[in-house]
Image: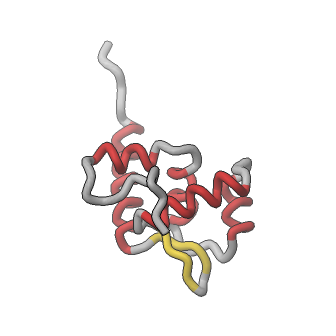
Amino acid sequence: MTRSDTPLPGRPVMALLDLLGRRWALRVLWELRAGPVPSFRELQSRCGGVSSSVLSDRLAELREAGIVERADDGYRLSGRGAELAEVVMLMATWAADWRPPP
């Protein structure tokens, strides 16, 4: 089943930015960057404050986009998801040094 509103690969970079810009999407990516999270409830707890319906929606979108997987050991980043997490970390490093012009 595909969700018609889920940005998918093969579309411009704006599709990725749209997906990652959705509430809690980056937080889910962040929480999964270090390894699998064993259950939905554990991931929800780590995300602190996300409702179960929003988390369920984000996981469905991220799974459909091939960024997150559900496996025997829990939710985890796919290979492509791990690559994306590295890019996000590079962006975080860049942002830490970002200063607006005087």
In the image as oriented, which residue stretches furthest toward the top? 102
Q: Position of residue 12 (x, y in %)?
A: 25, 48
Question: How was this image coloured?
Answer: secondary structure
Residue 84 position within the rendered picture, expressed as x and y whole percent measured from the top left: 36, 60
| In the image, farthest residue toward the bottom | 72
Q: Nearer the viewer, residue 100 or 22?
A: 22
Residue 66 locus on image (x, y percent): 41, 68
2 and 19: which is toward the camera: 2
Most foreground residue, 64 or 4: 4
Task: Please state if 102 lies on the left or on the right of 70 as rendered.
Answer: left
Q: Is residue 87 left or right of residue 36?
A: left
Q: Quadrant of residue 52?
A: bottom right
- Residue 90 drawn at (x, y percent): 34, 51
Q: Residue 97, located in which quarter of the rendered image? A: top left
Q: Nearer the viewer, residue 9 or 99?
A: 9
Look at the picture and state if 64 lies above or below 73: above
Question: Could you tell me which residue is drawn at 74 percent across and 67 percent down?
Answer: 41
> Left or right: 73 with respect to 7?
right
| Vertical comparison of 100 with 36: above or below | above
Identify the residue at horizontal 34%, vertical 65% (top origin).
83
Report the quarter where the C terminus lies.
top left
Going 31% across and 59% down the picture, which residue do you hit?
9
Residue under the image location 45 percent in, 48 percent down: 20
Figure label count: 0
